[in-house]
Image (cartoon, helix red, strand yellow):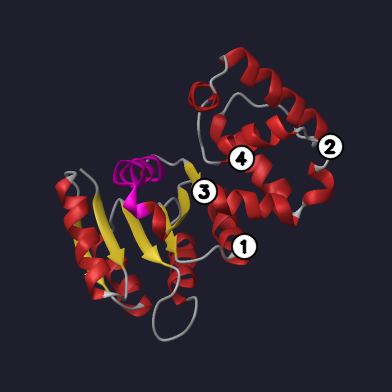
Amino acid sequence: MLRVVLAEDSVLLREGLIGLLERFGHHVVAGVGTAGELTAAVLEHRPDIVVTDVRMPPGFSEGLQAAVELRERLPGLPVLVLSQYVQRAYAEDLLDSCDGTGVGYLLKERIGHVEEFVGALDRVARGDTVVDPEVVRQLIRHRRDPLARLTAREQEVLALMAEGRSNAAVAAALSVGEGTVSKHFGSILTKLDLSVSDDTNRRVLAVLAYLRG
């Protein structure tokens, strides 16, 4: 069971998310509607994870700003951010906080895939990095020149690994063997001048750091 602070200004969505999380055995210790309430709730309850919308009253990106500031005050605080649209700068700010560990950036449409959403929550709480595939694609398009050296299949592997998937999960998604995935990723690291690491999360962070740069 995870203790969750949930920040969402839409009452209907907030109540729906509370019911969803509690149905999967988690406990929402606070459900709030503003960035100020989010900060107060986290400092009071010290939750296992924060789930917050990017856009919170009174302005445009207060939810994300509060999340980044909270991770600075409470290093290691896992945060899963939800957004209606892909906002590249916001994704970069979040991934830069606390070396990018224990963070997630998902589009709200992903909530409809219940098991996928809850799985992402669990992984972020464990310290993994989870990034929505569409965010990854936009990051890739933003840095198209260095990635032009990658084959179409290598870009698929990169996008899946940037979601935090293991070699086995990538292999299953692409219907290939794990050895093939390892070979593709080794080629990706070579082409992008990135050092090899056995830690999946570190590999994801290294790739995203390159894409952000």
Which part of the image, by quadrant, shows the N terminus? top left
What kind of residue is marked 1?
A: Arg
Can you give x and y, in whole percent of width and height, for residue 116 in the image? 36, 42
Q: CA distance from mark 2 to mark 3?
A: 23 Å
What kind of residue is marked 4?
A: Ala
Can you give x and y, in whole percent of width and height, for residue 40 in the image? 30, 73
Q: Mark 2 or mark 3, which has the lower sequence index?
A: 3
Q: CA distance from mark 2 to mark 4?
A: 15 Å
Q: Secondary structure at mark 3?
A: strand
Magenta segment main secondary structure: helix
Is 206 placed left or right of 13 in the picture?
right
Q: CA distance from mark 1 to mark 2?
A: 22 Å
Q: Nearer the viewer, residue 107 or 59?
A: 107
Q: Is residue 113 magenta?
A: yes
What kind of residue is marked 2?
A: Arg
Q: Nearer the viewer, residue 209 or 22?
A: 22
Residue beneath label 3, please?
131
Q: Residues within 10 Å of mark 3 (few under 14, many from 20)?
A: many
Toward which corner of the image does residue 45 lie, by quadrant?
A: bottom left
Residue beneath label 4, please?
159
Q: Nearer the viewer, residue 13 or 38?
A: 13
Q: Secondary structure at mark 4?
A: helix
Q: Mark 4 or mark 3, which has the lower sequence index?
A: 3
Res 88 label: 1
Q: CA distance from mark 4 to mark 3?
A: 9 Å
Res 149 label: 2
| Dots 1, 4 in contact, CB < 8 A | no
Q: Residue at x 79, y 43 (%)?
A: 147
Q: Residue at x 43, y 65 (%)?
A: 70
